[in-house]
Amino acid sequence: MQAIDQINQRFGRGTLFLGAEGINKKWKMRQEHRSPAYTTQWEDLPRIAT
């Protein structure tokens, strides 16, 4: 895993991955909903009304 991490760090995320992950990803992260602080600020986290 450390070797895979190092190669991905050097050549870009997703360059190497495990075969169990599959090659056709059905979902993608919705980055437009991410806070500008990337959750480093508690106030920026979305809240769910209960």
Image: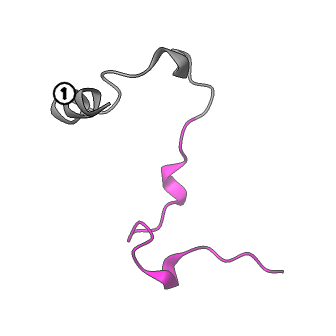
Q: Residues within 10 Å of mark 1 (few under 14, many from 20)?
A: few
Q: Is residue 35 magenta?
A: yes
List the residue tagged with mark 1: 11
Most foreground residue, 19 or 41: 19
Residue 26, percent from left and from top: 63, 26
| 39 to the left or right of 25 | left
Q: Which element is circle 1 on?
A: helix
| 27 to the left or right of 50 | left
Q: Residue at x 67, y 77 (%)?
A: 47
Figure coloring: one colour
Q: Residue at x 56, y 16 (%)?
A: 24
Q: Dominant secondary structure of the magenta stretch?
A: loop
The outermost residue toward the left is 10
Residue 28, percent from left and from top: 55, 37
Q: Is residue 40 above or below residue 9?
A: below
The outermost residue toward the right is 50
**Quarter of the image where one finds residue 13:** top left
Q: How many dots with numbers? A: 1
Disc 1 residue type (three-letter)? Phe
Residue 45, percent from left and from top: 55, 75
Quarter in which the N terminus is drawn: top left
The outermost residue toward the bottom is 43
Quarter in which the C terminus is drawn: bottom right
Q: Which residues are magenta?
A: 28-50
Most foreground residue, 46 or 1: 1
| 5 to the left or right of 28 | left
Q: Is residue 9 above or below residue 24?
A: below
Residue 33, percent from left and from top: 54, 59
Q: Is residue 18 above or below residue 36?
A: above
Q: Is residue 20 magenta?
A: no
**Quarter of the image where one finds residue 14:** top left
